[in-house]
Amino acid sequence: MLELNLARRAPALSPVASEAGVKVATLDAVGRLALRVKAAALAGRASVDGFDLSGAINSRSASGESGGERAALRLGPDEWMLLVPADETDERLEAVTAALTGVAHSLVDVSHRDVTFSVEGRGADAVINAGCPIDVSPSAFPVGSATRTIFGKAEIVLARRAADRFTVTCWRSFAPYVQGFLIEAAKDTL
Amino acid sequence: MLLIDCPYCGKRPEVEFHCGGEAHIARPESPIEMADADWGSFLYYRTNPKGLHAERWLHGHGCGRWFNALRDTVSDAFVATYEMGKPRPEVSPATAKA
C-alpha cells in the first residue's frame, strides 16, 4: 500500500447537525472501493469475495459475513462501489484483487475521495428533493435503491436505507456545500 | 422536467444527461486515401433535420454510459433510446408524433 493511503484527509465540515425534524449527520469514515468489470469478464459470477454483484443496476446489495458488513452499490452496468468497514479496506482490496485474478477489471481505493451524510427523519425525501431532481417516491426509489445523481451543483451517490433514511455520498471537496444545502433544506421540516 | 429513458436506468431527469452530437457516424477506415473534401465532410458536416434525429447521449450523472436516442427536433420529444452499437430503430410516424 502507498503511504499516501494512510493520510487522513477530512473536509472542513460544520459540526452543526441539523436541529430540525430531519437530522443531517456526517457518518464515520468507511472504506470505498470502485470496481469496474464487464459482465463478459465476470462470466456469470454473482459474488466476489463476499460482495454480492448480482443486484440490479441502481440497487444496494449487502451481505454481512464474519468480517463485518459488506455492501455493493451497483451504479452502472459494469460499475460497483464496494463499501467495507474502514479498518478492513486494505485487506478487502487485496482479497478482491486476488478473487479477480485473470479477470480484466479495475479496482481502486477511493475511500478518501468521498464523505457520506445521513439524512434521517420524517420528510427526508423532501430534503433530498430540495436539490435532487430524481423521483424518490417509494415506488420509483424503494428501500435498497442506490444511484449516482446530482444534488444542487454536486454529483452525489444517493442510497435509500429505510423509508425515511437516506445516505448522500459526495466528493470531499463538495462536502461543505452539500452539507450546508442539506441543513438549509432540513430547516423546512420542523 | 423532461425525462429521458436511459436504456440502463429508466426514466431520469434531463439534467443528469449530456448530448454528444449526431449518432451513427463511422470514422472512415483509411483517412489517408480520402479526398480532402470527403474527410472535411466527415469531420465537420452534420445533418440538421427538422424532425427525428439520432443523437448520442451520455448519462454522466447516473450510470455513466453512452447511448443513442431518437429525438424530435421540433417538439424535443425523445421517441426512442437504445444502446450503443444497435441500429437506428424504425419508428412509425404515429409513434413519432407522440
Image: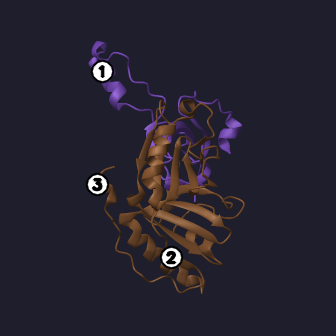
Chain colours: A brown, B purple
Q: Quadrant of residue A146?
A: bottom right
Which residue occupies the foreground of this view, A60 or A98? A98
Check residue A82 in the rendering and tell me which mark sits there, or answer none.
none
Q: Residue furthest top?
A: B33
Q: Residue A115: percent from the left, percent from the top? A: 44, 65
Category of crowding for the residue at label 2, using alpha-carbon neighbours closer than 10 angstroms: few (below 14), some (14–19), many (at least 20): some
Q: Are marks 2 and 1 on the same chain?
A: no
**SS state under label 2:** strand
Answer whether residue A130 is visible to the viewer in this image. no
From the viewer's perspective, is the residue at label 2 or at label 1 nearer? 2
Residue A71, percent from left and from top: 58, 55
Residue under pointer 2: A25
Tag 3: amino acid: Glu
Crowding at mark 1 (Cα within 10 Å: few <14, some 14-19, many 20+):
few
Query: What type is the residue that disc 2 sits on?
Result: Ala
Residue at position x 38%, y 20% in the image: B28
Classify residue A98 as left or right of residue A9: right
Marked residue chain, label 1: B
Q: Say the numbered circle drawn on residue B37.
A: 1
Real-space Cα separation, disc 3 to disc 1, in angstroms:
55 Å
In the image shown, does B49 or A4 lie closer to the viewer? A4
Label 3 in the same subunit as label 1: no
| Among numbered discs 3 and 2, the one appearing first in the sequence | 3
Circle 2 marks a residue in which chain? A
